[in-house]
Amino acid sequence: MATQPLPRISPEEYVALEQKLGVKHEYHAGQMFAMAGVSLPHGRIQMNLAYRVTGALMDAPCSAYPSDVRVVIEAADMATYPDLSIVCGPDQPAKSFRHSITNPTVLIEVLSPSTERYDRGAKFEQYRKLESLREYVLISQDAMAVDLFRLENGKWVFHPLRGEATVLSLVSAGIEIPLRDIYRGVNFEDAE
């Protein structure tokens, strides 16, 4: 016996449901998907990064947003919550999703075993539909390893960054962050 497809919900219904439930969900093509919580290393990396990025952007024309700010990819009928977003220039709010942005310049995800394949594959494929996106950063929580993807001459170029002396250079936002600062205080044994 075939199962009935789940009813499709509108972006407005998604926003209302999410507010009512008090839990973040990803939205894709009319469906809602609950987002998992984070490990201690994930949370520490996120906070270290937010601190460094926010400080570096104080006098810049760019703004950083935490994981509570929704990014909408209208071309993919998708809304999600990256771990950190940077917008260079004025925010462009989403039409159908309240309190959301549509024009991130940089998106950063801290990887976990349950989401790594998705973050590297299908999610990155959807993110590339954002005309504003110039850099996509994937940060490991179980090793000092950062993968930077940068749009260069119309092609996404992979830049692997390894070791505490290495620097993450976000050219589009004009900031540099040493990996040792991203991973400060992280106990890799606490990763998922």
Image: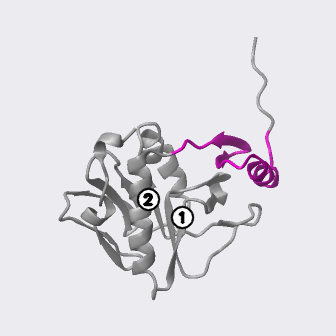
Q: Quadrant of the N terminus?
A: top right
**Picture coordinates of residue 17 (x, y %)?**
78, 48
In the image, what residue occupies the spot 77% across and 32% down?
Answer: 6
> What crowding class fits label 1: few (fewer than 14 Cα within 10 Å), some (14-19), or many (20 or more)?
some
Colour scheme of the picture = one colour
| Left or right: residue 143 compared with residue 73 | left
**Disc 1 + disc 2, Cβ < 8 Å:** yes
| Vertical order, 44 against 34 (above or below) | below
Q: Is residue 140 magenta?
A: no
| Left or right: residue 139 compared with residue 93 | left
Task: Provide the secondary structure element on which disc 1 rests.
Answer: strand
State which tag comes first along the sequence, 1 or 2. 2
Separation of marks 1 and 2 at Cα, in angstroms:
9 Å
| Left or right: residue 152 compared with residue 95 | left
Q: Amino acid at mark 2?
A: Gln
Task: Provide the secondary structure element on which disc 2 rests.
Answer: helix
> What residue is shown with label 2?
46
In the image, what residue occupies the spot 55% across and 59% down?
Answer: 67
> What crowding class fits label 2: few (fewer than 14 Cα within 10 Å), some (14-19), or many (20 or more)?
many
Q: Amino acid at mark 1?
A: Pro
Q: What's the magenta region?
A: 8-37
Q: Which mark is residue 66?
A: 1
In the image, what residue occupies the spot 49% across and 63% down?
Answer: 84
